[in-house]
Amino acid sequence: MHPKQERTLVIIKPDGVQRTLIGEIIKRYERVGFKLVAIKMLIPSLEHIEKHYTLDPNWRRITGEKTINGYKNKGLTPPSEDPYEITAVILKNLKTYMTSGPVIAMIWQGAHVVQIIRKLTGGTEPLTSDIGSIRGDFVLDSYQMTDADGRAIRNLIHASGTIEEAEAEINHWFTKEEIINYHLVQEQILYDVNLDGIKE
């Protein structure tokens, strides 16, 4: 597969929709040169969200271990040393958050789209996201606040972490018929080897 055919899943979460940032988020990805090949608005079910986060059978363990290490790296005591106990709470909060209102599910395509969209989106915690990233520019949430409130982090966007993860998530959110194959004029500038056809 040529890198220009790489695809990723992006979900604008309920807080992104409610804060009317849909256009801003789409603009950031379009400006780089990525192509939107599928989009829909829906309110996902609790079952759909649980399945999304557990497509990787190791998600519960890995996420729990990362969370425990995150607490310890900050000199804090984690609420539990059991990664599965930790992720049970995380998943419960994510299900409440992600089903609280409409979301926008999208598939973006282009060279290195998974990695670049993650960079444009910013780190999971808005407080420590770089200025210039979407989360760094538009969100003020932190793990400290989510722990105090007993809720999921409000960070506007989900973006697939790897090509393999993207493929599984795309298949979970979209049918093949919902994905449109088409050409954009700008692809000739982005990907054509010799820039043929610019001059008359």
Image: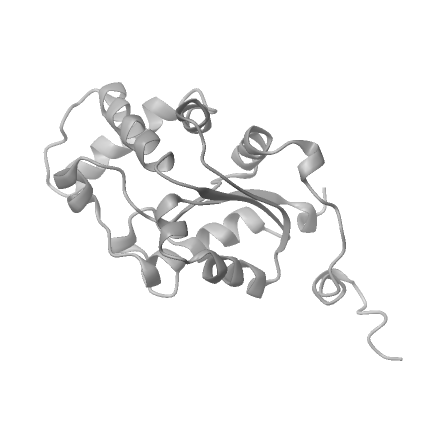
Is residue 130 visible from the viewing direction of this image?
no
Horizontal side of 15 relative to 177 (left or right) equals left
Horizontal side of 130 relative to 118 (left or right) equals left
Is residue 173 visible from the viewing direction of this image?
yes
The foreground one among 17 and 94 is 17
The foreground one among 77 and 32 is 32
Residue at (45, 57) in percent of width and height? 120
Q: Which colour style is shown? A: one colour
- Residue 77 in percent (x, y) is at 10, 33
As drawn, the residue found furthest toward the right would be 200
Count the marks: 0
Residue at (58, 61) in percent of width and height? 30
Against 35, residue 50 (above or below) is above
- The quadrant holding residue 92 is top left
Against 184, residue 181 (above or below) is above
- Residue 184 in percent (x, y) is at 73, 60
The foreground one among 98 and 18 is 18
- The quadrant holding residue 96 is top left
Horizontal side of 82 relative to 181 (left or right) equals left
Residue at (54, 46) in percent of width and height? 114
Quarter of the picture holding the N terminus:
top right
Residue at (53, 58) in percent of width and height? 29
Quarter of the picture holding the C terminus:
bottom right
Against 73, residue 23 (above or below) is below
- Residue 34 in percent (x, y) is at 61, 57
